[in-house]
Amino acid sequence: MIKTLPTNLKRRLKTMSPLFFTKALVKKLYIIPLFCFIFPTLLSAAEQPGSAQPVSLQKVLENITKTNPSISEAMKQYQSVLAERGIANSEYYPTVGMEVAAGPERTKGVSTNDVAENLTSTKASLFARQNLYNGGKTTAFVKETDARIQAAAYEVLNVANNVYLNTSEAYINVIKARDLLAISGRNALTQERIMRQVREKTEAGFKRASELYNSESRLALAKGNYISRKQDLNQALVIFHKQFGRFLHTDQFITPEPTYQIPATLPETIEIAFNTHPALKVAKYNIQTKRYAYEKANAADFPTLDFEVKGQYRDEIDGKEGDTTQVGAYLTFNYTFFDGGLRSSEQSKQKQNVRKEYQRSYVERRNINESVRLAWSIKEADDYKKEYLSEHVTLSAKTLNAFKEEYYVGRRTLLDLLNMENEYTDAQLSFTESQFSHLIAIYRIMQATGALLSEHDTGLRGMLQIAADEKDDLFDAENRRAIEAYKDLNDNRDQDGLTDTKDQCDNSSPNSTVQPFGCSDNDANNTGYPYEDDSALSPYIVPQSFEPVSTKQQ
């Protein structure tokens, strides 16, 4: 008689059966596709933990203020010059020091009656020396250093101003390329859908082969355009990477909305730029730096007077046994009568350096003048184009919808819809490009006027201890008196009644009548469309007149 098998043995036998093994294998096979679907998703999410987190332009600029190498280089240069203030101020203080020496000394001469004496000599001295007068060299040196510090501080702002503009343009261009790519992608899919419908009708015998070829060629072009737009986006990301130092996902970019109020007119905008652009502040303090360097060189024409207190201890010096203690207070007068032309040559060099920096200020003003005018021209043109391009998009959309309705009643073909889809896409592309061109022009105006540093305040001015509302005045009272010493420097070279720091046309014709900003004519050319919509126009196709043929001609 067969006994009942134990329960655990029954379980083992059951798991060893082919049916059980097959069921278990099927269950595991269901898990594999599910795992293959979920795992890449989890891996992608792990690789891009912050892909959904937007990064505003303000955050980007705050980051590059601390990490951009150009700004860091300018900041280190500023800190280096700042340390020179201690070097300059040190000349106001006395020099205190000591000297100790000891060693064998052999002496033979008058003091030893021509007998050689070998002694172990020891000497020590303690002194304190203070300059009382050096022709104003110390004062000029301190002022020169202070001017260099200010120039270096504004150079940091000038570098940051340029970096901020380049970064802003790169940031905006990524958004533009992303939006243009989306438009091109939608157009390519639309072209694909139309082409497939044309193919179906052609294969069914309702369309000509030429129509299929036409739609296929349009689709090929749309795909090529999409690849070009994709390449534009890739290049925009690379340019942005240069400024930011790392890549961001395209979804992290947010279209900036500047709050800067653009002045009403172009001359007013240039006037603001002349007053606030950091490059002109750098030019101003560079002139002061060279002027004080010239004053420092002139100090060499004057004598120097020093006061010195000195105590000495000497033991077994000059072959004599015994020690000597000496204490004295001295006034030292020093003057050089002839140095081979060294002083005059140095003064001539520094004087020419002043003239060079003075001319450099004109270069900076003309550069800023050009930058504002170019940016203003783009902004003004886009302001005018906005209405027409927006209308083009709206009317193209209406026309496309009308074409679709007419297609259903047999009055339009798929190729008609294809052509209209292309026109609608072109309208969207033109309008989008104009929008971003206008936005970049605003940022260029902000950069040219120095307002970009205020629009995106990153705390840089506070780090440099520079007030935001300081205005530039190259010909202030102090500079004006100093510049008068240079006979060939003039603050109104074209003699038009307006100082060159305010003159937007600094080379006006002689005896010309200028407007308040220094230009002889209205330099704000009309950019808008010159024709009125309801103006009288001749017909595009002029009707032809027919004369009856005479009987004689017949």
Image (tube, rainbow, N blue to C red):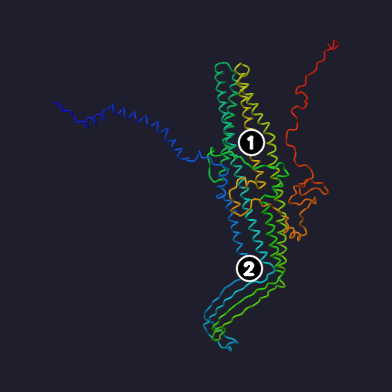
Q: Which mark is residue 435?
A: 1
In this view, the residue in front, 505 or 128, is 128
Given contact means CB atoms under 8 Å apart, are the residues at marks 1 and 2 in contact? Answer: no
Q: Which mark is residue 10?
A: none
Q: Residue at x 58, y 82 (%)?
A: 326
Vertical relation: 2 (above or below) 512: above
Q: Amino acid at mark 2?
A: Tyr
Vertical relation: 380 (above or below) 123: above
Q: Residue at x 68, y 32 (%)?
A: 387
Which residue reaches farthest left? 1
Residue 349 horizontal side relative to residue 29, left or right: right
Kind of element beneath mark 1: helix
Q: Earlier in the sequence, mark 1 or mark 2?
A: 2
Residue 486 in the image: x percent, y percent? 76, 60
Residue 154 in the image: x percent, y percent? 64, 53
Which label lies toward us, 1 or 2?
2
Quadrant of image for the N terminus: top left
Residue 437 in the image: x percent, y percent? 64, 38
In this view, the residue in front, 516 or 356, is 516
Viewer can see residue 210: no
Q: CA distance from mark 1 to mark 2?
A: 60 Å
Q: Which mark is residue 92?
A: 2
Vertical relation: 310 (above or below) 177: below
Viewer can see residue 397: yes
